[in-house]
Image: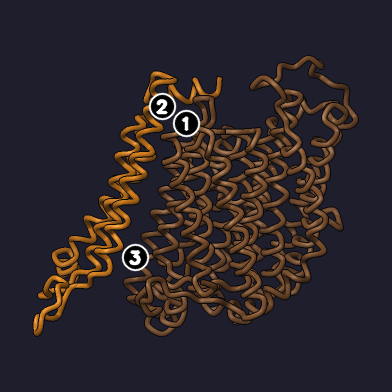
Amino acid sequence: MTLQLDLLTTHYNYYAVVLLLGIGLYMLVESPNLVKKVIGMNIFQTGIFLFFITLAYRAGANPPVVYEGQGPYVSPLPHVLILTAIVVGVSLTAVALALIVRIYSEYGTLDEDTLEKLYYD
Amino acid sequence: MIEHLPVLLVVLPIVGGAIPLVASLYTDRAGWSIAVVTMLGHAVLAGLLVQQVRTGGAVSYEVGGFAAPYGIELVVDGLSAAVVALISAVSLGVLVYARRAGPHENTFHSQFLLLVTGLTGMTVTGDVFNLYVFLEITGLAAYGLVASGREASSAVAALKYLIIGTVGASLYLLGVGYALAATGTLNMADLSTKLGEMVAYDSTLALTAFGLMVGGLTVKVALFPLHTWQPDAYANSPDSVSAFISALVSTVSAYALARILFSVFTVEFLTAVPAARWALIGVASVSIVAGSALAVSQNSVQRMLAYSSVSQFGLVIAGFTIATPIAVVGATVHLVGHAVMKGGLFAASGIIERQTGATTVGGYAGMGSRTPLAAGAFAILALAMVGVPPAIGFVGKWYILVGAVNAGIWPVVAVLLASTLLTLAYFARLGERLYFAEATIQEETPVTDGGEAVSFGMISVVVVAAVLAVALTALVPSLETLLNQTLPQLIQ
């Protein structure tokens, strides 16, 4: 029991990751509103970003700005990767929103179920 | 100059892709010429690279001069050289087709070149995170291209593709995170040695990384049941785009999956964890049967072709997962052959639609005499896809079959034969409609766009694809020698 409590208090970041991934994926699948689907996609990706940043963390370490005798440092690599991934995520959101604007102007709805009916007519 | 070839292959189309956007300030019709010039340059570079790999073996390049495990490494071996050559050739063919078929906007050509950048990058990279970035560049360009259709339904198809594709790529990224946590490296060659040493192959960490990376890529390859984005995307995009993405996007994703299997996790992993191997073979086998079965039940020709891809990529992935030299050669031959055949089939269906207005299996009735060249090419490509010798489709299937028999993986043998019958069923139905049925569509069908809808270039692309579907068989031995240099490193 103590072991599990220990996990709960030290690994809360990972719980947040799982929660974000779950909420994001659920929204993406379940919400009939296209904009909310994109928001869900963003939350899902944020979960992944948090996962990478958590990987880089090291207890008692300094930011990765190298000075004499300042080590140990946290790993800078995941931070750089996630900067790139954030840029990718922003571009995806932009493209998705542009498509949604076009869908709305053509069909006049953001609701997936209504759209499905119009789409297969 | 010559030592910078791998990186130039990526830089050239991305720079070329920016030019049409700038040119839009002056003219809206410069995109095509710029794209052709860029792709000709790309083809020359690809040719030089293939030559270099043939004579000197695998080429490796350190981007920015940072040493390999820390910097990004580009690696071109026999397998990637073959895929790079394919990308160049298919892109040029599609450009010839798009000259008349459109879209004509500069932005289309920018996206086209961006897609080539992403595909080439995925092929030459030797770094798992870099692969993710190129995967997303490919994805972004492909979503934009699908949405370039005139009908509003293309935007719906593109959004569906975007959401499912992003989940796939994100799962892959999560897998990269697990691999990074396990080994602290992102370089493929470095990962392949450290995965066995630093963490056991059957540890939860390694298995999760494998599951997420491979699972994410199967979304992009469109294996059943993760294929749902693909028929809509292919059927609703403009003809040039469906020919282009059906020929290349899933193909390069399947190549990336093979790269992850062989160059990151290695065959040792597959033998150490039979469950992982059988899971992938299972998914591939289900995909082979389900794709064919769904294709048989389609009425729209383009959707039928799309479901046929689901089945054919199941076959390719099964070949790679069997991982014996003959099966891997077979999978590569089928990967290249499928790209030519499927791209050609989509292009031919586009011409048939323009000339006769036929888009469904019923509508194809009696159209063989009305569009003799396109229908003839369609029939040859369809037979090649079924696997009638001496076409390229036969060679790939035969090698995979022999590989599966030698390895004693009987489920693959069974589904391969069953799916060949189903493939015959849906393509024979089309052939019968084309040539032996009474026409159901009247002669006077409205031709879109005004003026002549089909150019000589479009017809010649389809005819060349049909000729290649047979003639490529003669090139298989040289592909084999190219691969034989690489196979020992891939499959120890």
> Furthest residue to the right?
B436
Above or below, comparing residue B425 to residue B216 in the picture: above
Does any portion of residue B155 appear in the rendered image? yes
Q: Which mark is residue A102?
A: 2
Q: Secondary structure at mark 3?
A: helix
Where residue B52 appears, as percent x and y from the top left, is 62, 75
Q: Nearer the viewer, residue B391 or B174?
A: B391
Does any portion of residue B273 appear in the rendered image? no
Whether labels 3 and 2 share one chain:
no
Q: Which residue is mark 3?
A: B177
Where residue B367 appears, as percent x and y from the top left, is 83, 27
- Say which residue appears at 47% left-offset and 74% top-offset: B61
Tell me the mark number nearer the camera, choosing from 3 and 1. 1
How far, Cα to Cα, is label 3 from label 1? 32 Å
Whether labels 2 and 1 share one chain:
no
Q: Give the colour chain B carries in the figure.
A: brown
Q: Nearer the viewer, residue B441 or A94?
A: A94
- Say which residue appears at 78% left-offset and 53% top-offset: B468
Q: Secondary structure at mark 1?
A: helix
Where residue B169 appears, as percent x and y from the top left, is 42, 53
Chain letter tied to orange: A
Q: Secondary structure at mark 2?
A: helix
Q: How is the image coloured?
A: by chain
Q: Which residue is mark 1?
A: B155
Chain letter of disc 2 in the image: A
Above or below, comparing residue B52 to residue B238 in the picture: below
